[in-house]
Amino acid sequence: MVYTITVPEGYGYVVLIALGLTPILSFAQGILVSTFRKPAGVAYPNAYATPQQMKALPVAYRFNCAQRAHANLLENMPQSMLCMLFCGLFHPRATLWLGGIWLLGRILYAYGYVYGSGQDEQGKGKGRTIGGAFWIGQFALIGLSIYVAMGLL
């Protein structure tokens, strides 16, 4: 049996963000984590530097920030990507904008977390707030998904 699906004009841009740029961002953040791991003295399979390591080596704090930013991305990627792919079938332009806001916010979140949180745990990772706009994109995508789903009932 063969099925045909017709996608709206502009859907390719949605796919570009959801399945192209988002995985590239994840890969880039993984590389960033890797660049801090050895200088921080965090051996595999340990996911994070200990408080003692952070006191001895300030780069260990940066490693933890990079690791946490990457983990947070991985925690939020699945639903965001699915929302983009689903909503894009019905509202490709809105989804493109919301996905773009989400992606840019994720980039700023990671940058702020790693480079804007100070040199030690006193910073408490506060630099991540510069990318907090990703939540606007993410919640709007979830809301748009609900709106589209309600229209399908």
Image: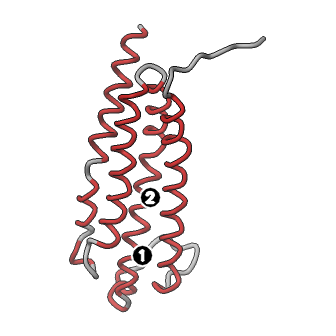
Q: Secondary structure at mark 2?
A: helix
Where is residue 60, by image quadrant?
bottom left
Residue 134's place in the image compared with 130, above or below, is above
What residue is at 34 percent from the left and 39 percent from the top? 138
Which residue matches tag 2?
71
Question: Does residue 11 sit above or below 133 in this rendering?
Answer: above
Task: Classify residue 26 as left or right of residue 50.
Answer: right
Task: Name the spot of residue 78 as percent of width and height, x first.
Answer: 49, 41
Q: Which color scheme did the rendering employ for the protein?
A: secondary structure
Three-letter amino acid code at disc 1?
Phe
For disc 1, the marked residue is 63
Mark toward the start of the polypeptide (1 vs 2) = 1
- Residue depicted at 50% across the width and 23% down the height: 9
**Residue found 39% across the figure and 84% down from its top:** 59
In the image, what residue type sits under mark 2? Ala
Identify the residue at the far right of this view. 1
Q: Position of residue 81 (x, y in %)?
A: 48, 38
- Mark 2 crowdedness (10 Å alpha carbons): few <14, some 14-19, many ≥20: some
Within 10 Å of disc 1 (Cα), the crowding (few <14, some 14-19, many 20+) is many
